[in-house]
Image (tube, helix red, strand yellow):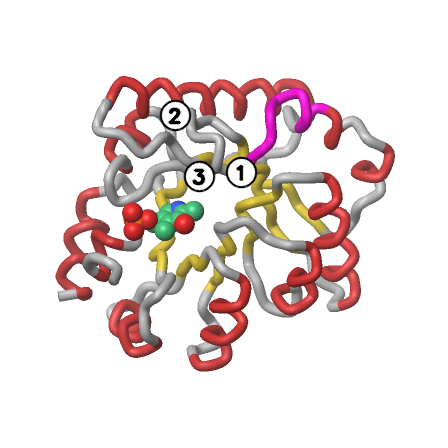
Amino acid sequence: MIEKNLKRLLEEIPQSVRLVAVTKTRLPEDVMEAYNYGHRVFGENKAQELIKKAPLLPDDIHWHFIGHLQTNKVKYLAPFVKMIESIDSLKLLKEVNKQARKYKRVIDCLLQFHIAKEQTKYGLSLEEADEILTSDVYSEMENVNIRGVMGMATFTDDENVVRNEFRDLSMIFKKLKDRYFSDKHDFNEISMGMSGDYKIAIEEGSTIVRIGTKIFGERE
Ligand SMILES: *Cc1c(COP(=O)(O)O)cnc(C)c1O
């Protein structure tokens, strides 16, 4: 079933959009079914779970970390994580830079924005991102590479609400690109869209979709 779901999704989404297969709560054997089909990009939203799961799986997997990350957990992810999509403070970015340096790595990062109505979701405002990107500390960081933005829309059936939030995130991406990254060709990622809303996200300019349920089935 996993293979079939994955195949269908990969046929459906445009070539220009990358799929992060979200494996939270899934067993290693489920992940392996997608891996054996040829998929290599996977996402987890809890540090503890990723720390336990990654060693049980092949090491050519590109792990994207997509959940709220506490600074004290960064050291465990720094040796192997491919991208941290959920940078939501300067403090976190500093810690990622520090730990990445220890392993002589440069870790790809996305700035997470709070675009939803729900208070519970994490993420920066545009003003906070401006503060980070104009700070002296940021200008000296050599072990993080900011590749773009990430956001989660409100959990609602109202398509217009979702579409407007994705549109906001695309706008934020364009503003940051103009202000800080106009010469940086690899500042080119907008991570938005999950099982319920990825079609709208793609229409609004998503380059990375993060999908779990549609591949692996409903979570317990
Ligand atoms: C769980 C999760 C997803 C995937 O959600 P599905 O609805 O299962 O596709 C995407 N992004 C984040 C940040 C998540 O935590």
Mark nearer the N terminus (1 vs 2): 1
Mark nearer the N terminus (3 vs 2): 2
Disc 1 marks which amino acid? Tyr
What residue is shown with label 3?
A: 191
Q: What stretch is highlighted in magenta?
A: 122-130
* Place of residue 5 in the rendered image (x, y in percent of width and height, measured from the top left): 16, 57
Q: Residues within 10 Å of mark 2 (few under 14, many from 20)?
A: many
126 sits to left or right of 149 = right
What residue is shown with label 2?
A: 166
Q: Quadrant of residue 177?
A: top right
Disc 2 marks which amino acid? Phe
Which residue appears at 75% of the width and 65% of the height?
Answer: 104
Res. 122 mark: 1
Q: What element carries label 1?
A: loop
Q: In which quarter of the image is residue 39?
A: bottom left
Q: What element carries label 2?
A: helix
User: Image height check: is 27 above or below 180?
Assistant: below
Q: Distance between the residues labelled 3 and 1?
A: 15 Å
Q: Nearer the viewer, residue 120 or 79?
A: 120
User: Image height check: is 124 above or below 208?
Assistant: above
Q: Quadrant of residue 100?
A: bottom right
Q: How far apart are marks 1 and 2 (CA)?
A: 15 Å
Mark 1 touches mark 2? (CB < 8 Å): no
Q: Nearer the viewer, residue 34 or 94?
A: 94
* Place of residue 10 in the rendered image (x, y in percent of width and height, measured from the top left): 23, 51
Is residue 186 among the parts visible in the rendering?
Answer: no
User: Image height check: is 28 above or below 74?
Assistant: below
**Labels 1, 2: front one:** 1
Disc 3 marks which amino acid? Ser
Which residue appears at 69% of the width and 55% of the height?
Answer: 71
